Amino acid sequence: MENPQQLDELLVCRLDDGRKSVEPCTVVIFGASGDLTARKLIPALYHLYREKHLPDPFRIIGFARREKNSESFRAEMGEALQKFSRTKPVDADVWSAFSSNLQYCQGDMSDPAAYRKLAGQIEGFEHPGLRKNRLFYLATSPSQFAEVTQHLNAAGLLEKVPASGSWQRIVVEKPFGHDLASAHVLNADLTRHAHEKQIFRIDHYLGKETVQNILMFRFSNSIFEELWTRRSVDHVQITVSEKLGVGGRGGYYEEAGAMRDMLQNHLLQVLALVAMEPPVSLEAESIRDEKVKLLKSIRPLAPIQVAANVVRGQYTAGEIDGQPRPAYRGEAKVKADSNVETFIALRMLIDNWRWSGVPFYLRTGKNLPLSASEVRVQFRPTPHVLFAAQCGPKLDANAITLRLQPNEGITLRFNGKIPGTSMRLRPVRMHFSYDSEFGAYTPEAYERLLLEAIAGDATLFIRRDEVETAWGFIDSIRAGWDNQPLMENEFYAAGTWGPAAADELLAASGRAWRNPQPVK
Ligand code: BG6
């Protein structure tokens, strides 16, 4: 007999031809001496090459100020790959073929001559596709975006309306501003020399397989989508917890805090996918339209409402897995009296037909007991008759948990009878695990995102109005904090699930956080 998995294979429904159509192009990485290039970008491009996803031919030019040549750049990247590659050992033949396409352009990002040199390097490529199709990856500080795009434009490398049959795109990393006003300026700067369609804003959460699966899960399964409304859902919890502290990133974090670093982007993106309406098509713009609509439906918080709906926290010294952790205020480059939040939890309402009255609870923090991201959709309790009448609050309500990472999968929790002669009920679980269904496959988010940017598909990137709408909401919270110092009850010891106030936020309505469970 055929095995059921083989039968399921026959039902695989292809939405694309399996391979992105990609044209020969040059990828220029600005900030090529930085951490991101060595840790993420080059390993991702190497794996795309290994899997034969990159166009033929292609070139990658690292642009940075440091004095080096293509040969030493290749050697450096080769060493970094040994360290950061998700597959080991690195295939020497593949690396050697891949790295022969890697070049370096030494120059200062503020010097027009450096861009002329870069243009000369690109012009020197024999293949016309390499000369005219260009992806500029700005792995730089956002304060340099305006300058770089202006110089690229002046050097004739970036045009708002590229010559027909060619393309030029810009990829930028967060933070996209630090509030609505600065995001507005940044977007205006970027769109001065490039059309919005040419700008690919990265949120690496959208590159995660499980985050992409949210749309498939919701809109290809009628049994779940039917339940995905205020009629069935009591509330939704989105948790992104991190075991790591701020470590060496104190300088950056002092400016960002958990709200700008995680909530404005990753958590709101996950929320948008979990709660948005079905798009009219799978086109990038249709999906992004729905995400923006959802973000616009978040009920804004007046300053006076912030305290009752948002809890912030900062870690004090503690212990995780038996290892001592310093207090945030004791981390390098952090002010001794810093009031920056390393934890945030909030209750939000979405004012649309589907979700009216359903609270969404979001939380994220550093130095929590576990690294895990999950979405828990908690269904309404059964009516107070039969089992509910007898068990009272002990009768657990149904829940679906989307485990985004680790232990990627989906769990449905419901009640079942404990076998035996007595009548006893307890929650049981039904698990879907990516690993056991599909085998271990964990491509890096950056691989997917770089490939999409090269192919020109903007679905997984953030549009200008998404960024700005998200900032509008974040600004309303900040206005409520109004530079108030943290209070005593807003500190939490490293290794705990955040300040007690975060529990009170849910307890006020008889609810409780369900913490992610460690992988067994
Ligand atoms: C980044 C934040 O965007 O996301 C980091 O700047 C955070 O502070 C990281 O640690 C979390 O990403 P992941 O993929 O490890 O969940």
Image (spheres, helix red, strand yellow):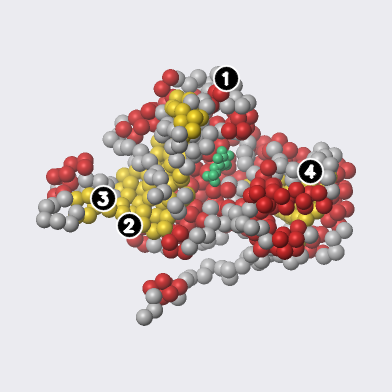
Residue found 39% across the figure and 75% down from its top: 3
Q: Which mark is residue 64?
A: 4
Amino acid type shown at disc 4: Ala
Q: Which mark is residue 336?
A: 1
Amino acid type shown at disc 2: Met
Q: Would residue 128 appear left or right of 392 to someone viewing this image? A: right
Queried on whether the Cβ of the residue with tag 4 lies below 8 angstroms from ligand 1, the answer reads no
Residue 55: % across, % down: 71, 64
Give the vertical position of 191 relative to 479 (above or below).
Answer: below
| In front of the other: 218 or 126 | 126
Residue found 67% across the figure and 45% down from its top: 36
Furthest-left residue in view?
421
All told, the count of numbered labels is 4
Queried on whether the Cβ of the residue with tag 1 lies below 8 angstroms from ligand 1, the answer reads no
Amino acid type shown at disc 3: Pro
Dot 1 falls on a residue whose secondary structure is loop
Q: CA distance from mark 1 to mark 2?
A: 48 Å
- Is residue 25 visible in the rendered structure shown here? no
Give the vertical position of 126 relative to 187 (above or below).
Answer: below
Q: Which mark is residue 430?
A: 2
Q: Quadrant of ligand 1?
A: top right
Give the vertical position of 440 relative to 468 (above or below).
Answer: below
Q: Earlier in the sequence, mark 3 or mark 4?
A: 4
Residue 471: % across, % down: 55, 37
Q: CA distance from mark 3 to mark 1?
A: 46 Å
Dot 3 falls on a residue whose secondary structure is strand
| In front of the other: 287 or 174 | 174
Q: Would residue 153 appear left or right of 371 to someone viewing this image? A: right
Q: Circle 3 sits on which residue?
A: 427
